Image (tube, rainbow, N blue to C red):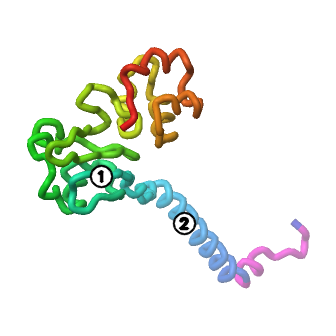
């Protein structure tokens, strides 16, 4: 220490600022540590992402119903829901055929065509005709998938390229290869 330095004198004069400075440093340190500790203890924030709206499907309803047309319905809709939206069956609807062939609890699929026959008329439900052929204009993915050489991807392609004027349109529109067409042509039809 230099000879003229009087530590006692400086201590007495600077004691209050030094103590206040150390106390302030202490408070800042406690604040920083508390903030860090609380941030580690806090539960992670859960971000609530609004789910996509329930998917919607479009279904074409024709035939003996009060209001035929194209309907937008929730993706889990059933035949019963579609008929209710259309105001119900018309007076001349073939109720015996409906009871025998139409499963009101079956789910509908996007792009599906449903035809309700009148009394004395032959009709189809969910793509199948009375003759057992699959209507490529109204069959579901699962019905098309049941055909030889038609998987889910080709079934979706068939649905996306609707409507068809004849079964030959499957080849004209290059939806399926010729060998698959030859294998299934007797099992499909256009109504």
> Which label is found at residue 30?
2
Residue range corresponding to the magenta coloring? 2-13
* Mark-to-mark CA distance, 2 and 1: 76 Å
Position of the N terminus by quadrant: bottom right
Image spot of residue 184 (x, y percent):
42, 19
Position of the C terminus by quadrant: top left
The residue positioned 60% from the left and 74% from the top of the image is 23
Quadrant in the picture for residue 21: bottom right
Quadrant in the picture for residue 7: bottom right
Label 1: state its secondary structure: strand
Which of the two residues, 20 or 62, is positioned nearer the viewer here? 62
The vertical placement of 135 against 17, above or below, is above
First in sequence, mark 2 or 1: give its number.
2
User: Which residue is tagged 1?
Assistant: 62
Q: Residue furthest front?
A: 120
Which of the two residues, 3 or 67, is positioned nearer the viewer here? 67
Image spot of residue 176 (x, y percent):
54, 25
The residue positioned 62% from the left and 75% from the top of the image is 24
Residue 5 colored in magenta in the image: yes
* Residue 17 visible in rendering: yes
* Residue 42 visible in rendering: no
């Amino acid at each position: 220490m230099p000879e003229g330095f009087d530590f006692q004198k400086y201590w007495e004069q600077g004691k209050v600022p030094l103590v206040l400075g150390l106390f302030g440093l202490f408070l800042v340190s406690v604040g920083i540590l508390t903030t860090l500790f609380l941030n580690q203890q806090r539960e992670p924030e859960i971000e609530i992402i609004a789910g996509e709206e329930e998917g919607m499907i479009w279904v074409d309803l024709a035939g003996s119903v009060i209001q035929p047309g194209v309907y937008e319905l929730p993706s889990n809709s059933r035949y019963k829901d579609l008929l209710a939206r259309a105001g119900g069956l018309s007076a001349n609807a073939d109720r015996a055929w409906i009871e025998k062939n139409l499963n009101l609890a079956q789910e509908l699929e996007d792009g599906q065509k449903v035809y309700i026959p009148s009394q004395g008329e032959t009709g189809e439900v969910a793509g199948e005709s009375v003759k057992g052929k699959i209507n490529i204009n109204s069959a579901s993915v699962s019905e098309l998938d049941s055909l030889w050489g038609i998987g889910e991807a080709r079934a979706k392609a068939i649905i996306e390229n609707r409507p068809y004027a004849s079964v030959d349109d499957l080849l004209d529109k290059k939806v399926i290869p010729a060998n698959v067409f030859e294998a299934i042509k007797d099992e499909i039809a256009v109504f």
